[in-house]
Amino acid sequence: MGLHTGNNTTITFKPAPVNTGIVFKRVDIPDSPDVKADIDHVIDISRGTTIGIGDVKIHTVEHVLAAISGLEIDNIICEVDGNEPPVGDGSALPFVEVLLKAGIVEQEALRDYLIIDKTITYSDPERGIDIVVFPSDEFRITFMVDYQNPALGTQYTSMYSLHEEFATEFAAARTFCFLHEVEELWKAGLIQGGNVDNALVIIDREMDDEELSDLRNLFQIDQTVSLSKNGILNGKELRYYNEPVRHKALDLIGDLALLGVPIKAHVMAARSGHAANAELVKMIRKEYEKKLIRKKFQSGDAKGVFLDTEAIMKILPHRYPFLLVDRIMDLVPGEHVIGEKSVTINEPFFPGHFPGRPIMPGVLIIEAMAQTGGILLLNAQTDPSEKLVLFTGIDNVRFRRAVVPGDTLRFEVEMGAMRRSMAKMYGRAYVGDQLAAEAELMAAIVDRDKK
């Protein structure tokens, strides 16, 4: 039974070729598309992680993902004949057991890792959530929760080795909620398959016999429901002294699987949940995409520079004397790019603009800004050598300062909107901290050989 939907379902794990990743398939739907378990397919994070494409959805995948990621499985097909995997006992252990029983095979390919080489921070002060990702030679987790409840209080856990600790120390940690949340969740259409056998219910208020009877009817529980002295409904014994925080770490492992690549980092989290985990994954994913771009175009170690001139020439078709970007300092795919142009007295336009008082033509400042934006658009293309960026409009152009020999122009271009092959961007050009020019740029990506 699914935890939130209450639907009966079966999940079947099948082998997959190299570079498949973790893929879910709804076999109860004819010709259903595969749904890759990555952050791009996350469509809901209310009390769980739901992935989908269009009308095809799979709810509450985090425990399955935790089992797969915790066992360091890279390629797998997860066939489900319903819209939510079975909850089992509320932990990842049932999935771990069947996967280990089936056996894990090493494939003929090197495992790709995302090596975190700088600190990444996510914070939500209103909810008291903090997550910090540090560089580390191995994947590690440190997790802390502090609930104002005697049954939980402040709890802390650390995992130093996924390979050695996950299956025995974390996989069996069960999902939990507070007693006051139960009725709210039920009325919200959640935990339709929840009961005292697949979740820990933490007692955080007193209930009389009538309320306990209502709770029994709500969950259609046959056995007696009681408030126990250990703070857990019906006196359920904890599998670990700090089982709730270990389950939070398990959820984090499952949500981090949405990166689509294992990481080498130490993740320290305080009071984090699925929503915060998803935001963290988006942040880390951008770092991964940046590394892929740099690996694709940058040959050699260009220290202090994201892409050097040779890399830029692999993306842009422009050449001397019309290549007006010297280096890319930073690039976040789909968001922004920062480029630089060193303006020297040897620029071919200075002899005529103007004799005796060289000033860079404003139209070329905008052209250099546009080329920087073109790198933001073309880097995502499979083969940028087959594409061109044609600018279809330029609005609200303003020039704020003259650009002269010796200046270094810094272009900051942000993506405004992207629909299919059409884009709108906002660009600014600076010399030091002084704004030199700004403009709104519209562009289309077209095939280079298009007539």
Image (cartoon, helix red, strand yellow):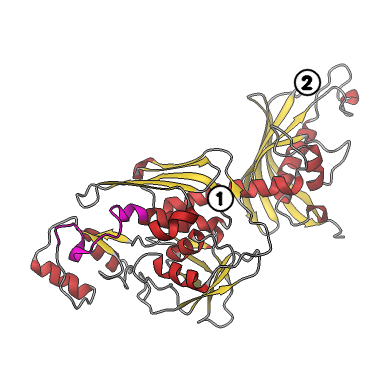
| On-image quarter of the C terminus | bottom right
Callout in the foreground (2, 1)? 1
Q: In this view, does 186 lie above or below 302?
A: below
| On-image quarter of the N terminus | bottom left
Determine contact: label 2, label 1, CB under 8 Å.
Answer: no
Drawn side of residue 171 relative to residue 195, left or right? right
Residue type at mark 2 is Gly
Task: Give the camera-side residue of 315 and 196.
Answer: 196
Q: Where is residue 374 in the image (x, y as percent from the top left)?
A: 74, 46
Task: Give the camera-side residue of 421 and 160.
Answer: 160
Furthest residue in direction left, as rendered:
209
Q: Position of residue 9 (x, y in %)?
A: 42, 79
Quarter of the rendering containing residue 220: bottom left
Q: Determine the secondary structure under disc 2.
A: loop
Name the residue rendered at 80%, 27% in the picture. 360
Drawn side of residue 312 relative to residue 20, left or right? right
On residue 406, which mark appears? 2
Q: Determine the secondary structure under disc 1.
A: strand
On residue 263, which mark appears? 1
Quarter of the rendering containing residue 187: bottom left
> In the image, which residues are magenta?
228-246
- Judge the density around disc 1: few (<14), some (14-19), many (≥20) Cα neighbours within 10 Å: many
